[in-house]
Image: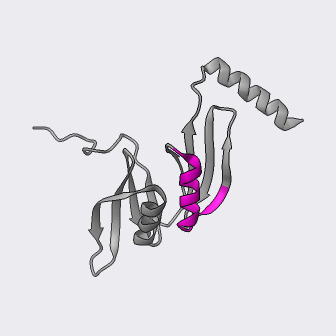
Amino acid sequence: MPVSPVPAGYHTVTPYLIVAGVPALFAYLAEAFGAREVRRTAAPGGGVLNIEARIGDSMVMLVEARSAHDARPASLYVYVPDVDVVHARAVAAGGTSLMEPEDMFYGERSAGVADPAGNHWWISARTEDLSSDELAARAAAHQAESSA
């Protein structure tokens, strides 16, 4: 039987966060976003090479920085049922607010936090279903308002 190129439980695109201190970042993600550990790979001689974590229905790979892979921040967009609650929880867990929860022109309530490793998490919930035409009109109005 052929092996699937995408592991069970994964999507075609999977966030891959290279950070210094994988266990600490996982602890933050568990507290802030309810991440659950799926698999942990120990480093030879101790420590952690990586943790595969599930946040909602998505997998996130956390990889320990080392000489071949420098730590680098990423930006991720996460949909949640209640932006205000998750934003507050993410800040209380040790994150830094980048943007307080706000209703946005594109039909979502959004907020942002930076995790302790420097990654940016944009937290959002859909509040309206907009057609492409409605979104284009709102974007144009928002741009005109921002430019004034």
Q: Examine the image and state in which quarter residue 24 appears.
A: bottom left
In front here: 25 or 12?
Answer: 25
The reply, left or right, for residue 105 in relation to residue 52 is right
Q: Is residue 4 visible?
A: yes
Q: Is residue 55 magenta?
A: no
Residue at the extreme bottom: 45
The reply, left or right, for residue 119 in relation to residue 52 is right
Q: Which residues are magenta?
A: 82-98
Residue 108 percent across, percent down from the top left:
61, 36
Coloration mode:
one colour
Q: Residue at x 60, y 57 (%)?
A: 113
In front here: 81 or 29?
Answer: 81
Q: Examine the image and state in which quarter residue 138 appears.
A: top right
Q: Is residue 95 magenta?
A: yes
The reply, left or right, for residue 4 in relation to residue 68 is left
Q: Is residue 68 visible?
A: no
Residue 96 percent across, percent down from the top left:
63, 63
In front here: 104 or 39?
Answer: 104
Image quarter (top left, top right, bottom left or bottom right) of the C terminus = top right
Residue 4 percent across, percent down from the top left:
22, 40
Residue 43 percent across, percent down from the top left:
30, 74
Q: Examine the image and state in which quarter residue 9 appears.
A: top left
Q: Residue at x 60, y 23 (%)?
A: 130
Image quarter (top left, top right, bottom left or bottom right) of the N terminus = top left
Q: Residue at x 38, y 56 (%)?
A: 61
Residue at the extreme right: 148
Q: How many numbered marks have been drawn onto this rendered protein structure?
A: 0
Q: Is residue 103 above or below residue 35?
A: above
Q: Residue at x 62, y 52 (%)?
A: 112
Residue at the extreme left: 1
